[in-house]
Image: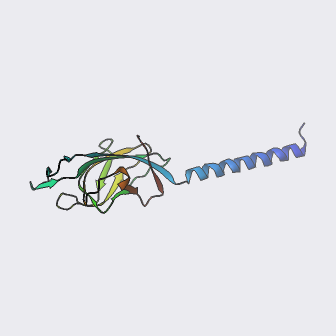
Amino acid sequence: MATWWQLAAGLLGGGAMGALLTAVITAFRGRIQPVSYTVRVTLLSPTKPGISLIFCDDSGTEWPYSNLYETVVSVRNQSNKDWPRFSFGLTLQSYHKATFASVETPDRHHELALASAISPSAPISELDYTSTPFNRGDEYTLKLYIVAYNNRPLAESDIRLGSVEAVRFSRVSHL
């Protein structure tokens, strides 16, 4: 038969273990959430001097470029959280400007919207996006055409991601 101290030890040990387990799970869920991304940069412009690649906008105006890059950025929610709306942005160096942007979403129920207008006549270095929704495992792909000015080639490290949400962006080689 169990004595009173065996019963007390069992109750105290069980309660302490439950409290410890609850604290560990709460800390895990409350951590800064991981969002992974990949970047692929491809030079489209010819490398011979004096040759330009022509890019047209909606109005039919021709824009010659000698340093045009196609950049594909994929972003995936690796966290344990689903966001109904998730805002994030891409920031380029000041000598790089995006002239065109398109998005690829998982299906018709997912949306990724660019906050500001972009065109060859109005290129930008800061692109803000809002995804609706951004659930666990969701992946969005952005395709950008970026012009490099001042003879500074575009590198994958020149593209920085950020968000107002409590997330940590981690660059990976593939998703």
Indicate the position of residue 93 as horizontal and vertical percent values: 33, 60
Placement of 110 over or under 117, stated as above or below: above
Task: Give the number of marks.
Answer: 0
Indicate the position of residue 24 as horizontal and vertical percent values: 64, 49
Indicate the position of residue 164 as horizontal and vertical percent values: 43, 61
View extreme (front): residue: 49
- State the residue in front, 155 or 88: 155
Colouring mode (rainbow / by chain / secondary structure / one colour): rainbow
View extreme (top): residue: 1
Side (left or right) of 121 relative to 84: left
- Look at the image and tell me in which quarter the N terminus lies: top right
Side (left or right) of 30 relative to 134: right
Residue at (46, 45) in percent of width and height: 78
Side (left or right) of 29 relative to 99: right
Side (left or right) of 144 relative to 33: left
- State the residue in front, 76 or 122: 122
Indicate the position of residue 36 as horizontal and vertical percent values: 43, 47
Residue at (35, 55) in percent of width and height: 158
- State the residue in front, 21 or 70: 70
Residue at (20, 47) in percent of width and height: 47
Residue at (40, 52) in percent of width and height: 84
- Look at the image and tell me in which quarter the C terminus lies: top left
Q: Find residue 125 and report its image quarter.
A: bottom left
